[in-house]
Amino acid sequence: ERIGKSKASIYSKLNCLGLYRRKSGRYIETEAVIAEKLREGKSVNEIRKELKISYCIAKRVKASLNIDQFQVKILSDTQAAYVAGIIDGEGCIMLSQRKSKGLPSIILSVANTHFGLIDYLGGLAKCGSIFDNKKKGNRRPQRRWMAHQRCAVEILRQVKPYMICKSKQLEIVCDFYDKFLNYHPWEYTKEEKDIMSNMVAEIHRLNKRGVL
């Protein structure tokens, strides 16, 4: 009453700021809910989809709580060897570059029609995301686990002693992470950009199906 604003307009402004969210005619404290779900181990993107809020709001709460999203589990020798076998047989190690001037992204993914295997892998790694691929024709439904950047590299470094088929891709990706990931694109020299492009091209060559 003092500022001449209705309760509805005030709550609407708070909702825009990410402090409150309307649900079933009631307002709940979004930040408290986000914090609780972050402590449960859910990723920012999963929380955004579940609560139907903006990515920036969830990320801001995560930053204020100082929660590291990339706390990768330390694997035992047996677990590392098993994960290496899965990646060698069913996985893919990539350097993906959508824009010619952008920084390539490190991607580690494993897809399989056995959902239990993918769920086990995601639970074992304690990072990355799991989603179902769209069914194509008469093919069986497929589930995929995917990790990016630091999460992918931390997993790959643990399984490195046991990798055989994709050991070259692993070395290129880890080398790329150490050289370039902590820098901004506008800081690269022409020589560095050439090295980066060669790494991306080599990964694509190694991952190419059929006769090389």
Image (cartoon, rainbow, N blue to C red):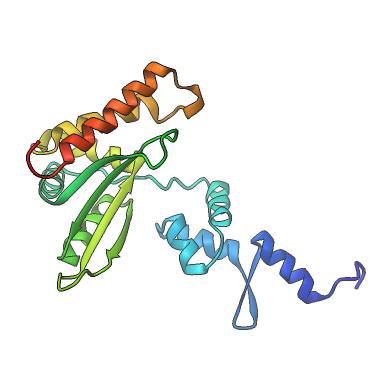
Quarter of the picture containing the N terminus is bottom right
The answer to whether residue 8 is above or below residue 71 is below
The answer to whether residue 191 is above or below residue 1 is above
Residue drawn at point x = 33 percent, y = 30 percent: 177
Quarter of the picture containing the C terminus is top left
The answer to whether residue 176 is above or below residue 208 is above
Provide residue 200's location: percent of width, then percent of height: 28, 32
Residue 180 quadrant? top left
Residue drawn at point x = 20 percent, y = 57 percent: 111
Instruction: Give left or right: position of 141 versus 162.
Output: right
Residue drawn at point x = 33 percent, y = 52 percent: 128
Provide residue 195's location: percent of width, then percent of height: 32, 22
Provide residue 88's location: percent of width, then percent of height: 12, 44
Residue drawn at point x = 64 percent, y = 80 percent: 26
Which of the pair 181/116 is nearer the observer? 181
Instruction: Give left or right: position of 22 versus 85.
Output: right
Instruction: Give left or right: position of 207 versus 50.
Output: left
Provide residue 178's location: percent of width, then percent of height: 34, 26
